[in-house]
Amino acid sequence: MMKHKTAGGVSAWRELLLAALIGMAGAWSLLFLYFWMLFINQIHYLVENSPIPAEISAVTLALGALILPGAAWFCRDFFPKLRLLNRALFPLLVPVPALLLWPESYFCLLLPVLAGGIAFYRLGAAFPPENYRRWRRLPPRCGVVLAGLGFAAAVWWYFGIQCRACDKFFLFFSDWGEYSENYLRLAFGENRSWSDFLAVAGHWNPVPNVVMALLFRLHPAAVTVFAVNALLLGSAVPLTYALARSARLPVAAALAFGAAAFLNPVLNGQALSLFYGYHPINFLMPVLLGFFVCRARKNRMGMAVLFLLSFLVQETAAVFWAGYALYWLAERRRLAGTALFLGCAAFFLVISSVVMPNLFAYASYAQMFHYSALGSTPLEVLCSPFLRPAAFWRTVFEWQNFAFVCSLLLPLALPVLMNPKLAVAALPLLAGVCLQSSPDVKNIVMQYGVEISVLLLAVAVLNAARLNRGRGSALLGFIGRGIPRNRHASIQLWGLCFGTLALTAGSYFLIGRYAVTKMNWRPDVGCVIEELRREVPRESRVIATSRQRVHFLFRNPTAGLDAKPQTGDTVILALDDGSTGAGELERFRAELAANPAAVPLGSIPCGGDQLVVFRLVPPGTPSGGLPFLVPMSAGQFAGSGPLLEQENPDFEVRAGSRGGTVPLLMVRPLRPVDYDVNIEIGPGGGKAGRVRLVPFANGLVPAYAAQAGQVFIAPLPEAAAGPVAVRILRRPESGPLASWKK
């Protein structure tokens, strides 16, 4: 029978009470984050109110109070182990007051993750050294196999996410569709020149352009883009492991940092990049990590090759290396640092201000729209602290900048802050993001933090290697106070592995699943996609809204809503998915409504949205009517069913039936209108239930284009069980073509 040592009465009760409080604090913090992380707007760093049910809180607190005593009970010495757990995990108490006082503060939501990382560091530092001796003996071959499996799992995960997002109408045509369209042109276009391979979509991308064009020659399909993107992102796992082993970290520690690379919310999030998908900046991940691997192995040739190669991936690589020059200057390598900084600055200015404008007829560097408040050229932006000081400092001190920095740093805070000297290299890149005029891009969901996160990952691994060489950390010594073994560098290393894994895992689940969560909320529309493809001939050009256009990119010629429809074109519009601005969409619909050649083919309900399909036919081609839009005299309409109350005076709504069985809703304009409408249908009589939004004429004929006496008939299966509540809602920015011309 297991024996447990006892403690004095007062001391025992004190330890049990403290253990209960720590367990409750940790459990409640997890519950809090679970409820609230579903409502974090990761673009604007806003948190919505999400109250936790009282009964769930009570059960969580009760179970939390038992966690630490239960864990200690299974150990040989109950009270000594309980006391050790209390000492290690007491940081879990710290975030609770902030969560109670400022529950809707984004910064307060980061505190439990940081506290958890510190607590797990202390727990790892409290383990007996003999436990780590066994980990040190993990054979290198086993590490290589596990790193390879991690790479395969990461690639499978990233590839699957992209495929699911595409099948759910989640991915926009921008950015990945635009890049793919250009790669197709480079692979198969007849009028391309060598200069076309140098830049695409306003970026200097020679290497991605050539590689993707060659791959498209072999297999022009969306899965090619998804596979390349998955391989680039997944490469962070084995390359981080290789970096850690090259820096002579033990196999187990190297695997821990490989897992941290996979869980990093910035790198992980680039599979979807909000909803923009693939971006050529991801080619820099293996190039930069490979550089640091060569650096750790003192392979100067490899460093030189990857250094030069990075300048052919994207022009922002020059900004990265300018930051590396700052690190050299901090290391007192003044001559080399100055030369590197000036060379990188000259390269960036020449590419952005001379080469690209002259080769591609740009008025200026295409990305300057991001800095419109500070200047119209890179030089003006650099001088903006003097030329436009008010705008400059206002932009610098936007609170989104601080949220962006905290979110970037959180997953690797412990190993990076141990010795942040190399992290100085991130300052120019950080300035490039934080000085952008729009706060919407200062987030970790999109691609703007990729190079910085790769650098921080390298800094974390190299700082951990310092511990392995016996150079202890003052920071870790401070946060590990009260843990006797915390003084030893080898124990700090293993504690750091625990803490880093806790930080990266917490960061991933709190702020790294934003796009994936939004994607999972959308229904799978694979059957709708197949139905659309059956309706569209291969020779027909497809003009479509953003999320639908990508599904025809590799099958048909495609265009956006800025194109002018021509005979033979097929038009596919999603009326309410938000991928296209309301003004742009409604103007295009007005043009279609005024074009007699635009014949409606059908309308498909799709996950709360409505897809409408048109074909541009030759003049004089007869077209059939719409069965749900029928002419009806005032007397016929009055006798079709009881009148339903609604607030819009321009419309009259009645409930009818077909054959006495199928309930119908009938909507009739009383007079000509200059706007389109949606019909909101829900249960009446104050009952709760599903509310459905149906466009007038299923979106095929706007209300302002309906002929006098035409009635829109919609089935009402919900009406069979009781009364119906109807609202006629004006569609924003809608109107006939004449109003747009005015």
Image (tube, rainbow, N blue to C red):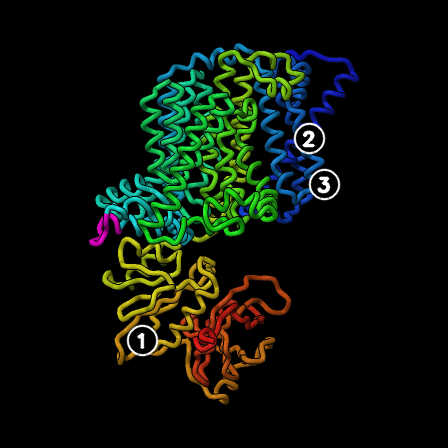
Mark 2 or 1, which is nearer the eye? 1
Return the residue nearer the eye: 684 or 597. Answer: 597
- Residue 621 is situated, as x and y percent measured from the top left of the image, at 26, 78
Q: Is residue 474 above or below residue 536?
A: above
Residue at horizontal 44%, vertical 24%? 335
Judge from the rendering whether residue 556 lies leftward or rightward of residue 346; answer left or right: left
Q: CA gap, disc 3 to disc 1?
A: 62 Å
Q: Is residue 15 above or below residue 173?
A: above
Tell which residue pokes out farthest to the right in this image. Answer: 10
User: Looking at numbered disc 2 in the image, what kind of residue is underneath it?
Assistant: Val
User: Looking at numbered disc 3 in the image, what kind of residue is underneath it?
Assistant: Leu
Q: CA gap, disc 2 to disc 3?
A: 13 Å
Q: Which residue is tagged 2?
A: 94
Residue 417 placement: quadrant: top right
- Residue 95 is situated, as x and y percent measured from the top left of the image, at 67, 33
Q: Which quadrant of the rendered structure holds the N terminus?
A: top right
Tell which residue pokes out farthest to the left in this image. Answer: 190
First in sequence: mark 2 vs mark 1: 2
User: Looking at numbered disc 1 in the image, what kind of residue is underneath it?
Assistant: Ala
Q: Which residue is tagged 1?
A: 597
Judge from the rendering whether residue 268 lies leftward or rightward of residue 201; answer left or right: right
Return the residue nearer the eye: 219 or 662. Answer: 219
Q: Say what secondary structure mark 2 lies in.
A: loop
Q: Which residues are magenta?
A: 185-193
Q: Is residue 113 above or below residue 373?
A: above
Around disc 3, counting alpha carbons within 10 Å, would you say few (fewer than 14), some (14 to 19), or many (20 or more)? few
Is residue 508 at all visible to an observer of this figure? Answer: yes
Disc 3 and disc 1 in contact, CB within 8 angstroms: no
Judge from the rendering whether residue 79 lies leftward or rightward of residue 182; answer left or right: right
Q: Which residue is tagged 3?
A: 101
Residue at horizontal 36%, vertical 34%? 310
